Image: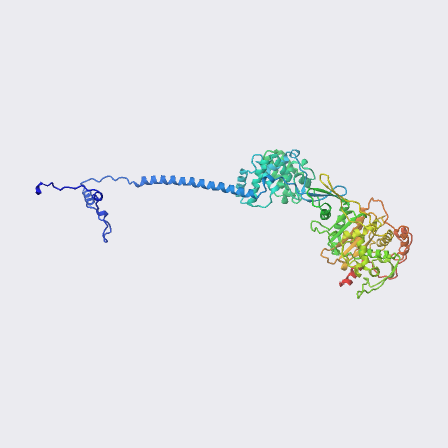
Amino acid sequence: MAWGKKKGGRKEPLFGLPAALADLRLTAADRIPNAGDDKPKKSAKASTKRKAGDSGDEPPRERKAPAGRSGAKRRSKSRFGVGLGRLVYWGAVLSLWGVIAVIGVVIYVGAHLPPIQSLEIPKRPPTIQIVGIDGSMLAQRGEMAGANVALKDLPPYLPKAFIAIEDRRFYSHFGIDPIGILRALVTNVLHRGVSQGGSTLTQQLAKNLFLTQERTMQRKLQEAELAIWLERKHSKNEILELYLNRVYFGSGAYGVEAAAQKYFGKSAKNVTIAEAAMLAGLVKSPSRLAPNRNPEGAEARAQVVLAAMADAKFITEAQAQASIGHPSYNVKPVGAGTVNYVADWIGEVLDDLVGQIDESIKVETTIDPKLQSVAEAAIIDELAAKSVKFNVSQGALVAMTPDGAVRAMVGGRNYSESQYNRAVTAKRQPGSSFKPFVYLTALEQGLTPDTVRQDAPIEVKGWKPENYTHEYFGAVTLTQALAMSLNTVAIRLGLEVGPKNVVRTAHRLGISSKLEPNASIALGTSEVSMVELVGAYAPFANGGVAVTPHVVTRIRTLSGKLLYMRQPEERNQVIDPRYVGMMNAMMRETLISGTARKAEIPGWPAAGKTGTSQDYRDAWFIGYTANLVTGVWLGNDDNSPTKKATGGGLPVEVWSRFMKTAHEGVPIANLPSSPGGWGLSNLAQAAWQVSPPTAAPGPAAASAGGYRPPPPTRTNVRPEAAAGLDGWLMDRLFGGNR
């Protein structure tokens, strides 16, 4: 029956999925709204609560603070922790990679260095000291490196000057100074440029010893590694001593000893505080601050060093002020002037004498410093006075003893402007100064100084050489023809004896240049150098013996080991003594009555020959006594013509000035004469005097033992010195126009 049942009915238990879904209910908010609804509908319960609130039946509940703020704080703290962790992590990663990168760079740089175990302090580059016959220093080649000076032998303020200005923390760093680098970096940034360096003395030494001067990052890193190695291998004092003996001071000077000798003429052991400050100041820019080039800049830099020394308490303020106020700089130029032409010549022959050198040497020479100075002054002064008038820009001089020892050599008027050696390297036409070889060949074929030949027009295969004035002397002796440098007679003789024989004679006496055996060889158309031409005249002064011009007598190492000594040459008689006497008598007339009448050496018998090449391009005079054989050349490097400069003019004047001084106080000696045969007395009877017939015989004529007959009656014939006969004839030979 229905009345027996409970209200609500019986609930059966549910299990499984139905049990899980039994309490699942959907509200209006959970339902999907219709397409026309903008918002989901609120539930009835919520609506009822809102109405009750509005009517005031139930007071409004207090709103709880939103949970968002505390959550944001928690999230902010969480994010900060995560960020800090990440920063620490990536910092550690980057640091690790940085360390790896540094190690890699160190390994890479080290791989490009020589093995540390094979690194040794390199030897100094060899230098060549060139000294004169009196032992004085003439010049120096190679890097000028003074002797090593021990640190204990130097005045204490000298090394301190370098420490004060270059590396104040030298005794406290390990080869690299991080503080110094940082200070230099800050200074450079403030000055917007490189105004201060951070390299230590050890780094500078490493660079000087093992590295190049290139400014690259790799080189700086290599420098740092080597500096650390030097600090581990050597003590601080050893490094400082090495530095002072190897650093460059400008003008080719390496080391404090060389610099002190170069600039002050004294040892580094004796420099003053002011001089020590100047030396320390040079290291910054040796070429720019060298006191022989920029004394004002060197002194200003020295004052900066003195201030740094006082600031470091190495010297007192009073000492600094005293040194600034009273500098004692005495710059001493070494190796300047035309003697450098000699030094260059020595450098060229050195390899043949001793081969390659690996240590410093001293070369003892035959150069007389006093004669070298006289020769230099004679060339320079003559050109200064007359170069514009005669359009002559260059000159050269070689003086040697009759046995070939060079006593003086000037290769040009100014070595600093031109290092081209016109005495050794240049080859020029000798003009009539070549004629003695023609006349000697004629004597050797049986002619004598008295032999007569015609000075008259001549034609050689269409070539018609003429005298300058178109005038001729007619019959003249060979002595007359040579003294007056008559070209037609020289050509006749050359053809008579044979051009090839003339060339053989010149080569036999010492000419080494190639000579063309043609008719014009008698007029000196083949080019020769001055040193070989002067050397070829030497047999006339020494009795007929061939010589080799030389300047080096000994070569030693600085420790005294003998590397080379010149041995006496084997006597090679290239001219019979009879012909030597004849040639000397003939060439004496050149100075007495011929083209070199301006040449004179009081009391000394002298002989020689002038020469002028085509179009007055070269002016020569080669003259000699029993003491010296000297040649002078004047002309232009570009072979341009001069304004009628002849051998009897400027060259004779230079020669006379030099030879007068060179023979002061030297006992007079006669030139070799013909033994028991033709001599000066015969010459006096055969030769003629160019001066007017009324002129009284000069001392030379009287000493010759007789009078000279008057010259031919033709009146308008001029000598070479006045008319430039050689130059005119060269024009005719080679198509020059006048």
Left/right of residue 48 with respect to residue 549 in the rendered view:
left
Left/right of residue 470 with respect to residue 313 in the rendered view:
right
Residue 297 is at least partly visible in this image: yes
Q: Position of residue 250 (x, y in %)?
A: 65, 43
Left/right of residue 25 with respect to residue 356 in the rendered view:
left
Q: Position of residue 539 (x, y in %)?
A: 82, 51
Is residue 484 shown above or below 346? below
In the rendered image, the quadrant that contains the C terminus is bottom right
Q: Position of residue 657 (x, y in %)?
A: 79, 49
Residue 195 is at least partly visible in this image: no
Is residue 282 shown above or below 477? above
In the rendered image, the quadrant that contains the N terminus is top left
Q: Nearer the viewer, residue 434 or 394?
A: 434
Q: Nearer the viewer, residue 395 or 629?
A: 629
Q: Nearer the viewer, residue 551 or 560?
A: 560
Q: Nearer the viewer, residue 296 or 92?
A: 92
Left/right of residue 15 with respect to residue 274 in the rendered view:
left
Q: Name the colouring of the figure.
A: rainbow
Q: Position of residue 122 (x, y in %)?
A: 64, 41
